[in-house]
Amino acid sequence: MSELTRTFRHALRRLARRPGFTAAAVATLALGIGANVAVFSAVETVLLAPLPYPQPDRLAEVRVVGKDIATLSAPDFVDLRDDADAFDGLFAAARVAPTLSDPQNDGGQPAELAQGFAVSEDFFHVIGVNPSMGRPFTPDEMSDPAARAVVLGHDLWQRRYGGDPGVIGRRIEVDGEPTVIAGVMPQGFSFPEGSEIWEPLPLPRGDLGRRGTNYLQVYGRLTPGATVDGANAQAEAIAARLEAAWPDSNTGKNLQVRSLREAVVGDYRPALLMLLGASGLVLLIACANVANLLIARMIERRRELAVRSALGAASSGLLRLVLAESLLLALFGGLAALAVGWAGIELLTSVQALEIPRLADASLDAPALLFCLGLTALTALVAGGVPALRLGSSRSLHAALLASGRATGDRGSHRLRGLLVATEITLAVVLLFGAGLLGRSFLELQQVDPGFEPRGALTFFTTLNETDYPESAQRVAFTDRLLERLETIPGVERAGLILGLPLSGPNMVIRIEELDGAPAYDEPSDAKSLRVRPITSGALEALGIPVIVGRGLTDHDRPGAAPVVLVNETAAKTLWPEAATALGHTIRIGAEIDGTPVGGEVIGVVGDIHGSSLAERPIPELYVPYRALPFQFFTVVLRTQGDPLHLTIPARAAIQELDPKLAVYRVQTMDHLLDGSLAQNRLYALLLTVFAATALTLAGVGIYGVVSYVASQRTREMGIRMALGASRKRVLGLMLTQGLGTALFGAAAGILVALSLGGVLRTWLYGLEPTDPLTLVASAAILTAVTLLASLAPARKASHTDPAVTLREE
């Protein structure tokens, strides 16, 4: 042990004598290891850590595949629940956004819109989590819509009720109805993701509604011994029976079972693994750079080590001395990496654009610390082991002892350093290519016409409760008063209502039943659907959606007049030969209000907008007057003069004047909505660019080190060449060629690797192929330019060698 202690003390003293070398190596490793620790913490939290429920591996989701929807209808859910014995329990969940108010007990708080789910019986049993305060729903509350109760999430309880335990059993108003607070869920519980309040979802055995009305998310707990594959096979068989029994609504409606983990985070796995792969490439480049530094360091010490060997030092002792330095460097780098990793984790968890479930829980916890320790050990082996074994061999030491006192390197060492630098360049090209693809894709998305004018538009969401507005006519009357009041606010040019903003939801897709009075399809599999958007007469103008052919809605399109509709350009081209020929045709969809079918004569064709993202191709859409389909919830759009956010307070006041019970929610500008739709693409491109820039910097440093070393070793040669008449330009060209040759070899290898891995990024690309030649050539060209810049300084130094000094030394 004492011998090992002396070895590390000696290595520590030598590192202290070369602070520049030590700082460069430690900083390089800290950057590489720290980036990996940060990304690993995110991956471990999101993809690897157990879900916060009892026996989470037995939880699963049942969803629809093969159609444009992923949800089930109530009748389909009941049939599935009754027939699927692979599940110990199944429950359905429907998204709700109830308005909370309580004039007696809320201390004058304004009404608040909460995000939550209505859940069927077995919810608490399936999830395996009960309220931490109060109780679950009773059987009466689950079966009787009049027995209203809610369970609050912990954060909502803290925010609105100050954490008061006395709220249990209190009656508040939810959507205007007296409702009892039954319980409060434990801190951190949110299921499905994003919910903060839960209501009962009664599913009576009688009339369950239309099988074509799909709105339920379904989750279950597998029976002991059951597998996801077995449950999936059973669900497929049930879906086939339902399709045979109900072809009109269930044709093509296949069921798929997947684990809850896959349902929650599966869509984010590729992005996280991409970031982990990018950080891993940066670490490999850092290891190669440190290995190069250690090789140069060992070359300087070869004669010292040779003398030690000649005086009787054992080879194992010399190897131990060399490895001690690399281990200390890795250890210092690992300690510094903890700070880098912590900062990276804070950055990742603070970026809302990622929107990755569970990412906010990422921290520098025990798994992350163990990962950092493992990476540190691996880095010490990779960065220090190879050069130590290479330069610590007995043959190398013998050659060093026979050489002059000047530190020199053999051809093997030179080739090894060149190979390491070529590896750095290869990996840097891969990262540059990926960053270039995502960056160009983001620029392509920015050029996409969103179909609306975002500047000067303010939006907010609200919902009308069934107690105060049970009838369609009451909702229409209220919205008429609301729009009239909003348009009196100074600065408001136009006001309108719409269900489902561009680039967001909610989206309502309904099947076409009739075209020009005739059935729209012969077989259910031939049926076409439209995304339906109820709007008021001012909505298109407020959003800036153009009318291409015909006219838009006006205040004269009221009940009693001939029913009219608008279609978007994609729908017009899908249903009729040309957009202009759509005018005058009639269309009816599979929905009705107060017994009246929804549809009418097409009076206009409007421009396409995008559903959930700019990368999504526009789909056929139908715009119907809000009076024909008056939903309880809607979005208000204001076309304004000046800064739209300045009208937030007057707009809220207008709502409160008409109905103090209404909550105003999701207040934002359309500019912010458009920018938010691009945020994730921008962030992934930025993160990969940061990794690529780091790799480029490290590769440049490696090239500089190699060319500097070669220049120092060829000083005598250059002096003799110049003494024999070689010009400085020729000497400069010789040295630049040294670095350029290594760069071209690495760039060629990088192009091959990038082409093979480009398909990994296909999910995030828009308007580009993963083998885009322009991006590939640009990546190689950037690396070549960096190589020339990194090689220039040492090459110029070599070209200014004084021949007279060289000859006198000889």
Image (cartoon, helix red, strand yellow):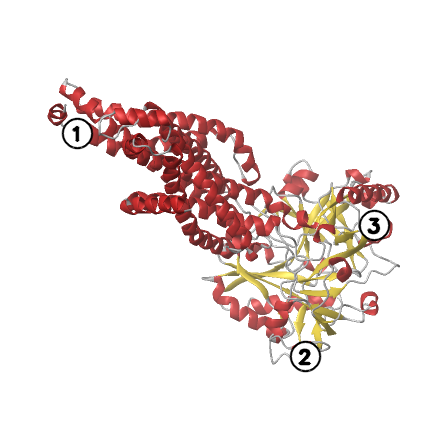
Query: Percent x, y for residue 512?
Result: 75, 45
Task: Tell which tag, 1 or 3, sits nearer the viewer.
Answer: 1
Residue 80 disc label: 3
Taking the spot 66% from the left edge, 71% from the top edge, the residue there is: 100
Query: Percent x, y for residue 598?
Result: 75, 53
The residue identified by callout 1 is 800
Furthest-front residue in this view: 312
Q: Quadrant of residue 109?
A: bottom right
Q: Disc 3 marks which amino acid?
A: Leu
Q: Quadrant of the C terminus?
A: top left
The residue nearer to you, when weighing 494 against 34, is 34
Q: Disc 2 marks which amino acid?
A: Gly
Residue 290 seen: no
Task: Tell which tag, 2 or 3, sits nearer the viewer.
Answer: 2
The tag earlier along the polypeptide, 2 or 3, is 3
Left or right for 754, reference 512:
left
Left or right for 33, reference 510:
left
**Secondary-structure class at tag 1:** loop
Task: Tell which tag, 1 or 2, sits nearer the viewer.
Answer: 1
- Disc 3 crowd, CA 10 A, few/some/many (<14, 14-19, 20+): many
Q: CA distance from mark 1 to mark 3?
A: 83 Å
The residue identified by callout 2 is 166
